Image (cartoon, helix red, strand yellow):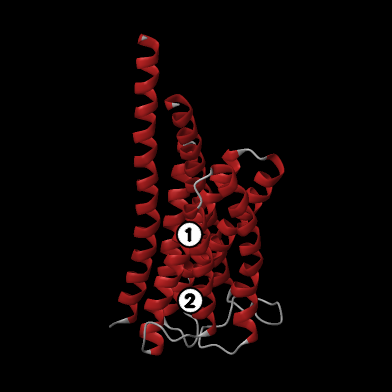
Amino acid sequence: MSKIWQIGLFIWLTLVCIAAFLWAPLAEGLGEYTRILYFHVPVAWVTVLAFLIGAIYSIVYLKTRKIVYDHIAESAGQLGIIYCVLATVTGSVWAKVSWGSFWNWDPRETSIFILLLIYAAYFALRSAIEQEDRKAVLSSVYSIFAFVTVPFFVFIVPRVYSSLHPDPIINTQAKINMDGKMLTTFLSSLFGFTVFFFWIFKRKIDLVKMKLTLRKMEN
Amino acid sequence: MEPIYVVLIIILIIWIGIFGYMFYIDREVTKISKRIKKLETSGNQN
């Protein structure tokens, strides 16, 4: 990413922070906690995006059998796990102050916990197989099946079961009920976090390629 | 605890997590590029 993009992203995210604290109004019933929305939800969104990219690269690997794509899929999975842990931890802190305890086995908490387990199993699978081609094939197939569960756990389960969690942004009628300023701040944050994710992901791809080059040179 | 402090703690966790991981990747990239350069120069000398 060029310097101009980096500076632009920094300014964009700074403006999002300012808007979240000084410009966007507070939602009824949530009070000051409304501000968490602009950070917690984009992190959860990026989790889904990372797992989706992981599944796409797994498909590409299965089609081309080029090992670099398997490593890129792994990198996307690692980023997905990081963001998923961040969404879980921040959600848990929010739960402590709103519901009285860090963990309540609420449908939203349970579904993200299962998602974490599913992707932890992906890495367990990878570390359990030594032969590289076999590892790549099995983990690619697993990654594709793992992603099939993501929309179910992230978008469907919390809307089917009654939850203590604040209403999803897009409600069960597929509509967004949000104040204009809040929506602008939220979408800006979503965009900023997404671009930031792609920046980190590009760095991860660079790292993967460099590791492969190094391995070739050492052999 | 005041709600605003909870908000700040949550935002801090997110930024520390993301930036922390980004710096870790950057460090890895620097480390590996140094090793590649070292191998390249030793290869050229031979």
Residue A45 placed where, x, y %?
56, 64
Task: Residue at 71%, 44% (x, y): give it.
Answer: A63
Q: Secondary structure at mark 1?
A: helix
The answer to whether residue A207 shows anywhere in this view is yes
**Left or right: A167, with B29 as reference point:** right
| Residue with the most extreme left position | B1
**Of the pair A191 and A121, the residue shown nearer to us:** A121
Which quadrant holds the C terminus of chain A? top left
User: Image height check: is A74 above or below A155?
Assistant: above
Residue A22 placed where, x, y %?
41, 69
Task: Residue at 38%, 41% (x, y): give it.
Answer: B26
**Left or right: A20, with A154 as reference point:** left
Q: Which residue is mark 2?
A: A25
Q: Amino acid at mark 2?
A: Pro
Residue A202 placed where, x, y %?
51, 43
Task: Return the disc, 2 or 1, that comes first in the chain's sequence.
Answer: 2
Q: Secondary structure at mark 2?
A: loop
Q: Amino acid at mark 1?
A: Ala
Name the chain under label 1: A
Task: Residue at 53%, 50% (x, y): give it.
Answer: A74
**Of the pair A214 and A168, the residue shown nearer to us:** A214
Q: Which residue is mark 1?
A: A124
Instruction: Check contact, mark 2 vs mark 1: CB within 8 A.
Output: no
Task: Residue at 52%, 67% (x, y): give it.
Answer: A44
User: Image height check: is A200 above or below A146?
Assistant: above
Residue A134 placed where, x, y %?
59, 47
